[in-house]
Amino acid sequence: MSSLNKAMIIGRLGQDPEVRYTQSNTAVATLSIATSERFKDRNGELQERTEWHRVVAWGRTAEICQEYLKKGSLVYIEGPIQTREWEDKEGQKRYTTEIKALTLTMLDSRSGSGGGGMKQESNNKQMANASNIDDSFDDMDDDLPF
């Protein structure tokens, strides 16, 4: 049986996108996205648990992040989870696990009121890459590049 590596999250940016450029002038955006779940504990009290996700977007998607996203923006992200390794200044091996954003959909309303929910705008600026997300999630095709 083959395997699957695909994360799908809807959350809010914890800070403005951090964009840098590679030596070949390719944009790379790093996003910090919070997802939350609410539940009742054993005592019946409402609790909230927040999980933070590191997301990396490349190329035109990164440029769109820089241009249109800001702290608090609501986004849908889809892509594989990957772990990178590097060596820090002291020679120590460091690791980070992140989601590589192959699909990014902005879910805020155009006015910035944050009340856009899952409603899709018809403007192309609302999406980076090819996938669409609708109110019912009925038509989720796997358009993976490999």
Image: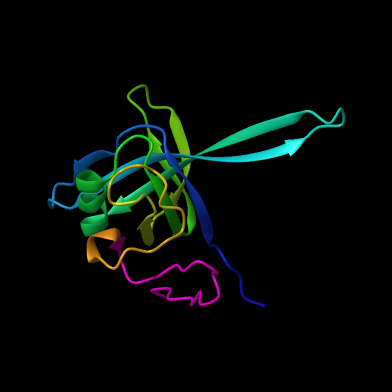
* Residue furthest right in the image: 42
User: Per the image, is 140 magenta?
Assistant: yes
Q: Is residue 23 left or right of residue 70?
A: left
Q: Residue at x 26, y 56 (%)?
A: 61
* Secondary structure, magenta segment, majority class: loop
Q: How is the image coloured?
A: rainbow
Answer left or right for 49 relative to 79. Answer: right
Most foreground residue, 37 or 62? 37
Q: Nearer the viewer, residue 41 or 5?
A: 41
Q: Which residues are the magenta region? A: 127-146
- Which quarter shows the N terminus? bottom right
Give percent across and percent down for residue 87. 38, 33
Asked if residue 128 is positioned above or below residue 47 in the image, the reply reads below
Compare residues 140 and 47 and report the one nearer the observer. Answer: 47
Q: Is residue 25 left or right of residue 61?
A: left
Q: Is residue 123 above or below residue 28?
A: below
- On the image, the x and y values in percent for residue 6 come to 53, 62
Indicate whether residue 48 is drawn in magenta.
Answer: no
